[in-house]
Amino acid sequence: KIDAPDADAVRSVARNMRARDLDEIMAVSNAETQADLIDALVARYADAPDAYCFGDDQGWIAIGAMATHRPNVITLGFFATDRFPALALPIARFTRRELFPAYRARGVHRIDCVSKADYPAAHKWIALLGLRRAPHALRGFGRDGQDFLQFEWVRDDLAG
């Protein structure tokens, strides 16, 4: 299932998100607690036109967004529950085959995201989306000095 996330869907996924996702998002958030973070995620993603909710018959599993912070540049945001492996490949295929081309057709020339340097499972999935790791780490990018990596697709890349 793919739908626009409402507040209940965002809250459900956020309350049950993977520990590594929580750690990563807290590192770049102003939230002091998980409860504060959940409220911020609901405020950002619920009913947002650039957000997507992914799930199955058992419930919602992941929330993703393609936010435009600069003209024709998309920044990905994503978090999921421990049930994410069941949908990892279908979500990657949908994103790469449906979402990215639709945004590119509207003039998007760059798609990027950041991930904590010590989260290789996320990096592997980001690569499935067709994004490449940028050559330099974002040292001290997190609020407590955590290093992050940037991943990107630029229109001139061969990655798709």
Image (cartoon, grey):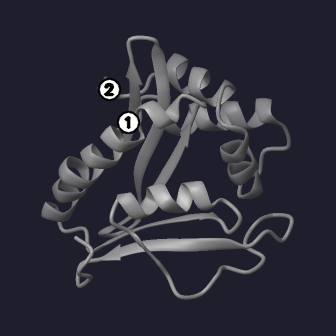
| Whether residue 50 can be seen here | no
Q: Which of the two discs, 1 and 2, labels the residue nearer the N terminus?
A: 2
In the rendered image, the residue lying farthest to the bottom is 135
Give the amino acid type for the residue marked by disc 2 in the picture: Asp
Residue 57: image x %, image y %?
38, 11
Residue 131 point in image, percent of width and height: 38, 68
- Residue 30, position in %: x, y? 77, 51
Element under label 1? strand
Query: Which image quadrant is residue 55 in?
Result: top left
Q: Looking at the picture, does residue 104 appear above or below residue 46? A: below
| C-alpha gap between disc 1 and disc 2 | 6 Å
Work out whether residue 62 can be spotted: yes
Q: Quadrant of residue 3?
A: top left
The residue shown at (26%, 54%) is 96
Name the residue: 57% across, 27% down: 13
Looking at the image, which is closer to me, 45 or 125? 125
Please give the residue where the numbered disc 1 appears in the rendered image. 52
| 3 shown above or below 102 | above
Residue displayed at 66% across by 45% down:
21
Circle 2 is placed at which residue position? 3
Above or below 45: residue 159: below
In depth, the one of 44 and 91 nearer the eye is 91
Percent from the top left, x then y, of residue 60? 47, 21
> Looking at the image, which residue is at 76% across and 66% down?
142
Q: Residues within 10 Å of mark 1 (few under 14, many from 20)?
A: many
Quadrant assignment for the N terminus: top left
**Mark 2 Cα-neighbour bin, 10 Å: few <14, some 14–19, many ≥20:** some
User: Looking at the rendered structure, which numbered label has been put on residue 26?
Assistant: none
Q: Amino acid at mark 1?
A: Tyr
Label 2 residue SS: strand
Q: Can you say whether 98 is above or below 110 in the image?
A: above
Does the CB distance between marks 1 and 2 fall below 8 Å? yes
